[in-house]
Amino acid sequence: MAMVGLFWITEESVHLGSPPDAEEHYVRITSEGVQARDGDGTRAWPWSGLRSAVVEAAPVEGEAGGGGRFLAAVLEAVVTLGSSYGGGTPPQMLLVLESDDGTEEVRVWAAAKGYTSQEIALSQRLLTRFREGAADPGTLMAWSRDHGGTPRPPEREALLREWVGTQNPGTEDGVQR
């Protein structure tokens, strides 16, 4: 299992934010769409029915502490998810899904205390590419089968750029370099 950007990746699944917690709450990204399980039950949104899928309030990693603190936060999230997160709860993000039927919001536990701004922007672009059918979560799972483990920040960003389909995302993909 590994975390790359806002995605938690295993050989069998891709989750937005953290992996399933002790109560099996999750937001899963599949080739068909988004699945969420929470206290209200299980819900699904096919990509074809979504006009947009955007993550709001993703926690940003501070400049101080760097990658070591980031990786420690990932390990802490895995070990303590569902109980406490360094004395509190993990940060929450909000997945906003817009369809012809309106807008729905899904709370998502972050897998880390913070992400780099580039990881957030590239993850947003990858989520859009999933919705457009221009990228497939199976690519991320295949990578996990071959590599596993959370890479360092520069490698995570390089992977996201590869999965988005560009080596220099520029402003076209909504990512400033």
Image: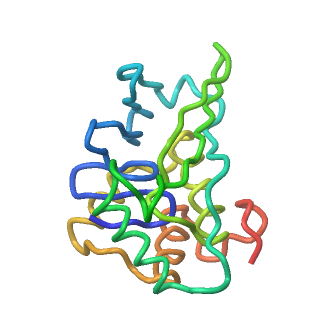
**Residue 26: x %, y % from top left:** 37, 39
In the image, 24: left or right of 126?
left
Q: Is residue 49 above or below residue 67?
A: above
Colour logic? rainbow
* Residue at the image position 76 percent from the left and 62 percent from the top: 172
Q: Extreme top residue here?
A: 101
Q: Position of residue 170 (x, y in %)?
A: 74, 71
Horizontal side of residue 140 vs 167, given as left or right? left
Q: Position of residue 117 (x, y in %)?
A: 67, 69
Identity of the residue drawn at 33% across and 67% down: 2
Q: How many marks?
A: 0
Image coords of residue 91 (percent x, y) = 54, 54
Q: Quadrant of residue 10?
A: bottom left
Q: Who is closer to the viewer here, 172 or 82?
A: 82
For the C terminus, the image quarter is bottom right
* In this picture, residue 95 sits left or right of residue 76: right
Residue nearest the observer in this picture, 169 or 147:
147
Q: Is residue 8 above or below residue 53?
A: below
- The residue depicted at 31 percent of the width and 45 percent of the height is 21
Q: Quadrant of residue 105?
A: top right
User: Is the N terminus in the top left, top right, bottom left or bottom right quadrant?
Assistant: bottom left
- Height in image: 150 above or below 172? below
Q: Residue at 33%, 48% (x, y): give it.
A: 82
